[in-house]
Image (cartoon, grey):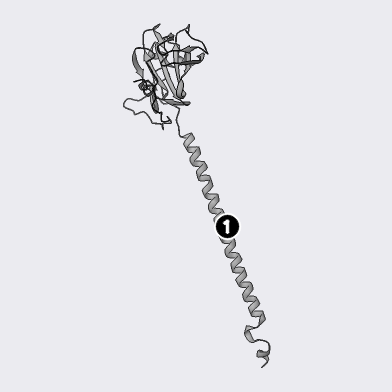
Amino acid sequence: MSNNKKGGIFGKGYYIALILCAAAIGISGYMYYRNANKTQTQLQEPVADVAATAAQEDVIVVVTQPAKPGEEAPTVPSTTPTQPKSAMKTCAPVEGQTISAYAMDCLSYNETTRDWRVHNGVDIGAEEGAEVCAAADGTVYTTFTDDSMGNTVVIRHEGGYTTMYSSLAEGLKVSAGDTVKMGQAIGCVGSTALIETAIGPHVHFSVTYRDEQMDPAEFLALGQ
């Protein structure tokens, strides 16, 4: 009789304890779910940063390993943007033989520095003193003498293209601000590029499209 008066084993105290246990389980489950999500977010976020950093650091600019007979040149990813069709008229800057080809998606051997490196243009061998012409209509952006590439002329063209002519002889025929026509003489073939002296008199001809390197052959093909 005394047990029934007090509510038996299922009295108020029992139900209060049951409610407290349920609440504790619910709070523990919430905290576990919250911490698990937080940990997963922390683990995922650095992955994007590492991938972005790797994409930047994996582009090889120069490899200072000597050439070995039969060795294949290492490759590097291409960053050249897609160029649109254009009605621009173009011409080769000088008549001559291509000594060193464009190589931004692989490494080529430099006979002067004796190492593997990317090559952002083409080296066109020609008789020293032969006239070098503007490859397209444009405006001379600048002229300068570079410690590595020698006497240089830079011309900007319509559509976001820029051409650069290096290893020119002394006595350039244009100055910054000059408007030039395709085929107009801007200088002469020389041997002033110190990092390319082993190949003799030539013009180092390079092209950029929207500040990204592109194959000069593709630029010249725009005029065909």
Locate residue 188, reporting x and y percent. Answer: 42, 8
Q: Residue furthest front?
A: 87
The residue singled out by tag 1 in the image is 35
Near-viewer residue (164 or 86): 86
Query: Residue at coordinates 62% horizontally, 83% vertically from top-left?
Result: 10
The three-letter code of the residue at mark 1 reads Asn
Any part of residue 63 in sight: no
- Left or right of 41, for residue 164: left
Locate residue 83, reporting x and y percent. Answer: 41, 28
> Quick one: SS at disc 1?
helix
Query: Residue at coordinates 38% horizontally, 17% vertically from top-left?
Result: 123
Any part of residue 20 in sight: yes
Locate residue 76, reporting x and y percent. Answer: 41, 31
State the image quarter where residue 28 is shown.
Answer: bottom right
Near-viewer residue (115 or 48): 48
Query: Residue at coordinates 35% horizontally, 17% vertically from top-left?
Result: 99
Near-viewer residue (13 or 94): 94
Residue 10, compared with residue 160, is above or below; it is below
State the image quarter where residue 223 is shown.
Answer: top left
Locate residue 217, reporting x and y percent. Answer: 36, 22
Query: Which quadrant: the C terminus?
Result: top left
Q: Residue furthest bottom?
A: 1
Query: Which quadrant: the N terminus?
Result: bottom right
Residue 154, compared with residue 51, is above or below; it is above
